[in-house]
Image: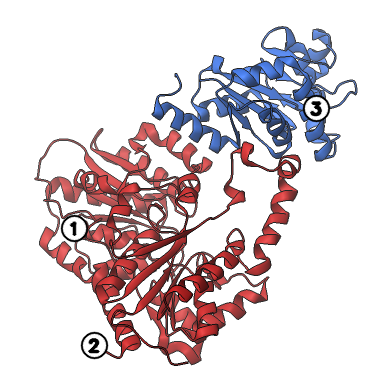
Amino acid sequence: MRVLILTTRPKLSARTVRSWRSELGVAKGDLRLVAMPASFAGRPMPAASVILLPRSRRWGALPWSAAVTSGREAHILGGRRIPRALEARIGRAFDDWRSRKPRELDPDLVSARFAAQCATLPQIARQFSRADIVIALDPGACRAAWQMAQQAETPQVLFGLAAGSQAVAEARQRGGLGQ
Amino acid sequence: MSRQIHDRPHALYVAWGFPPSRGGGVYRALASANGLVEAGFDVTVLTCEREAFERFTGVDPSLEAAVHPAIEVVRLPFDWPAKEVDIRRWPEARAQQPVAWLLRRQEEDRRDFPETSYGHWAKPLEEAALAIHAQRPVDLVIGTANPNVDLVPALVLHERFGVPFVYDHRDTWTLDMYNECEANTDDPRVAEIELRLVSDSVETWFVNEPIADWHRQRYPEHAEKILAVPNGFDPDFSPLPAPRRAAQENGPVRFGYIGTMTPYMPMQEFVDAWAIAADRLAPGEAAADFYGYLGFYGTPHRGLSALFADADESGARYLGPLPKGQVRDVYAGFDVLLLIIGSGRYLTSGKVYEYMASGLPIVSVHDPSIDASRVLADYPGWFPAASLEPADIADALVAAAEAVRQATLPSLEAATSHAQAYERSRILGPRFDRLFTLITGKD
C-alpha cells in the first residue's frame, strides 16, 4: 500500500505527519509526502519519506530545520543548506518567527508554483506513478494532483485525508492492496 | 379543475433518498411508498440515481428488495460536486481554484431553488414530474424533505393542474432545531416557498409534536393541517425482542449503539462518562460496541474517527457500518442500548422507536428536555442520564449494568407492549387511508 500525500500547508510538523500516517493506517515506508511548507516544527523529519519544495526562490524559502535534516530523512529540492551550528542557535526561533508572521504568497501563486514543480521534477513523477493512492491534502495541492492525474489512468487521486483513509480501508477490504 | 380518478389513484412520491441509499430518512420513504400501495394507490417514486448513493451516501443493497414490486421507480441523475473527492472527475477550473469554484457552484445551485447542493435538481425534477403526469395523470403528490427540493414536483403539479399534495418534513427548513431559532433567514425565498407549501398542501407533516407546534404558531391560519407524524419503527428492520440475560451470567454487560454518529451528538461526553463508569465497575464487566457511519456522508468524519481511536482502550469500540440485514443479529448480542442524541428540545430521533421495539433497557445520553424523553417516559427499563455531565451519564451506565447483572429489569413483555403503539404502519396507515378517501371519495 503506497500512499502519496501532496500538500501546500504552510506549517508542517513531524507530529502532524505522524497523525496523518496513523489515520491512514499505513507503514512508515509506505507513506510519501511532497510538501511546500513555510515552516515546520519538530526534528528529526516526519515519520514518512518527504520531498520538500521551496515556497519561493528567496533565500530561506525552506524552513531552516528542513534544510538541516536534508541528508537524513528528508529529500530536499532547492533551498539552501544552513550550517548546523547556526541552525541550532537560531533555527527554531527563526522558524517560530516565520510561522507567526509568514510572508505568505497569494494562494493561487502557491498552488501554481507547487503544480509547476510537481510537473517538472522527475522524482515526484516517479512517486506519483508508484503510488496506489494520491491524496491532495489541501486546496493548494489540487492543481498539481489534477495535472499529474491527466498523465496516467492510475493511481486514485483524491481530495482530503478522510477520503484517502476511506480509500485505503476500502482497498484493504477488497484485498487489492497489501498491508 | 375536475379530474377523473381511476379505481387506483396515482400517487407520485418524491424522495431524494430512496433504496438503495442507506440514509436515515430512507426507511420512512420506503415505508411510505409501500404504505401508499397498500392503501390502494398506484405509486410512482421519483428519486435519485443509484450512483449518487453509491458514491456519496453509501448504500444498503438489501433495502431494494423491500420496495413493493408494484412501485415504479423513476431515477434522475444527480450531481453533487461538494462531495466529489475524486480529483480525476473535476473540471480543470475546479482543480485550479477549488474554493472559488465551489462558492460559484453553490451560488448556481441556489439560482432556481434556495437550497445549497440540491437547488440545481429543481429543473430536472420539474421536467420529470410533468412527464410522469403527461403519461398518467397524478392524483396525489407526497414530497418528503430533506432535501426541500423534493417538494418542487408538488408545487408545479398543484399550480398547473390542481393536484393535491402532502408536505412531509422529516427535519425542518425554517427552524434551526439545534439552536432553537429561525433558520435560513438570509434568503427570503425560503420563507415564501414554505408558506406556499403549508398553505397549499392538504396536510403538512412533521416528525414530532414540538416541531409541529412551532410551525402551528408560525402558520396559525393553517394550524389544523399541520400534524405530527412520528417515524415509528419498521417491524421488518427492527430488532426482535430478545430474552433477558440471566442473573449471574458470565461475560461483560454489552452496551450497544447502532446508527449514524454525527458531530451533533454528545460523543465526547459519552466517552468521558464511559471512562468513569469503567472505573466504577469491575474490570471487564462492561463493553460498548458502536456500529454505523461516522458522519452523514460516505467519507468518515475525522473528529469522530479520532475520538474512537482514543477510546478503544477503555472498552468502547467502533466496529464500522452495519448492513440493515445484520441489524437484528447484532441487537441480539446487546444487553443495554445507548441512546445518544444531540441537544435540542425539538429532537426525537427515529432510533428511539427502533430501540423500544427491542424491549432492551435503554440508557439515554442526551439533554433530558428533548422530545425523546417524552416518548420514553413510560418505557419500562429506561435509564436516563440526569444531565450531559459525564458523572451523570456514568451513573446511568452503572445503574443499567447493575440491573442487567442482578436481573432486576422490568419484564420483556411490558417493554415490547409499550413499543407497539409506535409501529410505523400504525402511524402512517391511517394517514394514507385518509388521503385515499380524500382523493377518491371512497372509504
The vertical placement of B382 against B260, above or below, is below
Q: Give the residue displayed 17% in from the left and 62% down from the top.
A: B415
The vertical placement of B222 against A170, above or below, is below
Residue B359: numbered disc: 1
Relative image position of residue B387 (x, y in whole percent): 39, 59
Query: Badge 2: few (under 14), some or many (20 or more) residues near its Cα, within 10 Å?
Result: few
Q: Give the residue displayed 51% in from the left and 30% down from the top.
A: A23
Q: Are marks 1 and 2 on the same chain?
A: yes
Q: Quadrant of residue B281?
A: top left
**Residue type, label 3:** Ala
Q: Quadrant of residue B11?
A: bottom left
- Alpha carbon separation for disc pair 3 and 1: 62 Å
SS of the residue under disc 2:
loop
- Alpha carbon separation for disc pair 2 and 3: 72 Å
Chain of the residue that carries numbered disc 1 in the rendered image: B
Q: Are marks 2 and 3 on the same chain?
A: no
Question: Which residue bears the numbered disc 2?
Answer: B443
**Left or right: B274, with A84 as reference point:** left
SS of the residue under disc 1:
loop
Relative image position of residue B408 (x, y in whole percent): 12, 54
Q: Give the residue displayed 71% in from the left and 14% down from the top.
A: A123
- Of the pair A49 and A101, the residue shown nearer to us: A49
**Residue type, label 2:** Asp
SS of the residue under disc 3:
helix
* Chain in red in the render: B
Chain of the residue that carries numbered disc 2 in the rendered image: B
Question: Which residue bears the numbered disc 3?
Answer: A116
Q: Are marks 3 and 1 on the same chain?
A: no
Question: Quick one: label 1 or label 2, which is nearer the N terminus?
Answer: 1
- Alpha carbon separation for disc pair 1 and 2: 36 Å
Q: Evaluate whether residue B151 shows in this view.
A: no
